[in-house]
Amino acid sequence: MINRRRFIQVISGACAGAAVAGLGRAAQVGLLPRSSDPLEAWSEPRAGGGLRAIVAAGVLAANPHDSQPWKFRLGESSIDVHLDLGRALGPVDPFLRQMHIGIGCALENLVVGATEQGLSGSPALFPNPMDATLAARLVLSSSDGPPSAHVATLRRRHTNRGPYGPARISVGAEEAFRRQLRDTNTHLAVFDSSSALGRAFSEAIDTSTHALIEDELFMRATDGWFRWTPREVAARRDGPALDCAGLSPMIRVAAQLGPRQSDESFRRAWLASTREVHLATAAAFGVISVRDPARPAQLVEAGRLWQRVHLEAIRHGVAMQPLDQWLELVDRTRERGLAPPIATSVAFASRGYTPVLMFRAGLPLREALPSARRALDDVVS
């Protein structure tokens, strides 16, 4: 028989052992405090004002798979925005559609950030025909106008991959999204998820996600960007991570402390979350289209539009997340020389426009956490 005192000693010892083991695992994966903060870019800028402070706003932009595919060169009164081809996504983005859209998002943030510094920015797209990596040059001048209304949401905009509530998006919010259209070569469609168009959208995303999971080269390229532990996030400061996967806090910490998922389990989880969370809980879907997706400048403008819409969504308490699987499948089949998937593009765009970005929207049930960003010195020259 074990007496009460001995029982308490055994249990205390077991708990202490578990705590030590847990701390050891937490230290191993990087959950304990660290000297390098990959989220520091989201705090109030400490870039000292001027052009670096504007770039500090630019790097907060949405971008594909958190690849941050940009470089910035500072002039006396201008900022050049370059595509960083070394951060291309390979089979995930074989024609750089997503990269150009991400560059457009960064350019829009630069324009917004300039107003915070009392400046106005006039962008010229692809100003040097001999340099295809120079996507934009933002020429800055003094301005007496007020800061952009989107300054207030620059540091609050995060992609929300969690569940959304059942309430519909207000008509006023949808109208505000459409007011973000500035370029005649771009088009925005927003529609209810329960509509016939919404059901077609869901079917396209579900089917294409399943097809992509069967594409080993595509999935290996995707898996290579995922950062499983806080230590990986702090070391790389890029890529999707568990913190930004829309998981509950308890599941997120358990996943970080537990053994790493197998590739097969991770892919099944992606398909399940797409079906049961991303599609099932969306209040609305949206599509951004352009007249000619073969023109990089139009893709950059599509990115600027997406950034404006997302910044505006935060003002209205609306969460958003790209759902680009169907477009990724289109790109992938084109790269492989295969027959394209079912042409649902007619359903998703107005006549004369081609989809280049698809997304979901709704009222969030869970706060979205910020994603990592590289240090300014790593992207500015």
Image (cartoon, grey):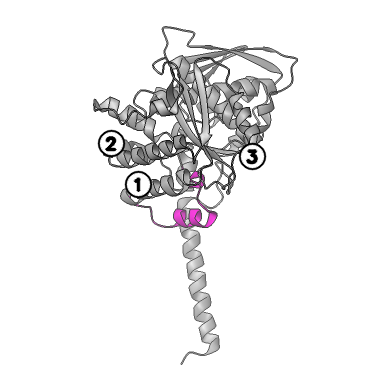
* 256 falls in the magenta region: yes
Please state which of the two labelled residues, at mark 1 or mark 3, is closer to the viewer.
Answer: 3
**Quarter of the image where one finds residue 170:** top right
Amino acid at dot 2: Leu
Amino acid at dot 3: Gly
Q: What x and y, as percent, mark residue 353?
A: 44, 19
Instruction: Give the Cα separation between the discs numbered 1 and 3.
Output: 31 Å
Instruction: Give the Cα separation between the discs numbered 1 and 2.
Output: 13 Å
Within 10 Å of disc 3 (Cα), the crowding (few <14, some 14-19, many 20+) is few
Amino acid at dot 1: Arg
The residue wearing badge 1 is 267
Q: In this view, does 296 lie to the left or right of 329?
A: right
**Quarter of the image where one finds residue 326:** top left
Q: Nearer the viewer, residue 272 or 76?
A: 272
Please state which of the two labelled residues, at mark 1 or mark 2, is closer to the viewer.
Answer: 1
The segment highlighted magenta reads 241-262
The residue wearing badge 2 is 217
Q: What x and y, as percent, mark residue 350?
A: 46, 22
Tell me which residue sits at (28%, 38%) in the image.
215
Q: Is mark 1 on a helix, strand or loop?
A: helix
The residue wearing badge 3 is 317
